[in-house]
Image (cartoon, helix red, strand yellow):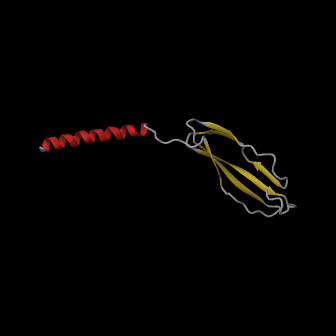
Amino acid sequence: MSKKNTNRRAGIFLIFLVAFSAFSPLISTTSATGVIELSLSEQHVLMSPGTTTNLTLTIHNNDSQINDYTVELNPNYNSAWNLSIVDSNIEDVLPTFSSSTTIVVTLNSLALLSDQT
């Protein structure tokens, strides 16, 4: 095999590699497992009666479009707990980006050990 043929093959291979590299970002093989992903700053919080703590709720937008979210609390929690959301409307979360809000948790000063949840 001559050196000229080897250089030509190497050149063709290099052109193919450059073309493949240029178009590979346009070919997406990944997919999101869900439209949104939720995470809390703390999974477990140890609190004494009469204390307050803040939790950060992060919403990650796995969708392919800009989304707005409304955060609501389940009203069936124990009355010894006072939960409030600082900003319940989260708007204009870009695809693959995250936005956060704060949840303020207060445990009543008269709470009992049985008031865990």
* Residue 113, horizontal then vertical, whole percent: 83, 63
Q: Quarter of the image for the C terminus: give it.
A: bottom right
Q: Is residue 38 above or below residue 22?
A: below
Q: Residue furthest left?
A: 2
* Residue 111, horizontal then vertical, whole percent: 85, 60
Of 94 and 116, nearer the camera is 116
Q: Disc count in the image?
A: 0
Quadrant of res 53 = bottom right
Quadrant of res 68 = top right
**67 to the left or right of 88:** left
Q: Is residue 51 above or below residue 40?
A: below
**9 to the left or right of 102:** left
* Residue 92, horizontal then vertical, whole percent: 62, 38
**88 to the left or right of 13:** right
Q: Residue at x 81, y 46 (%)?
A: 75
Quadrant of res 21 = top left
Q: Residue at x 57, y 38 (%)?
A: 63
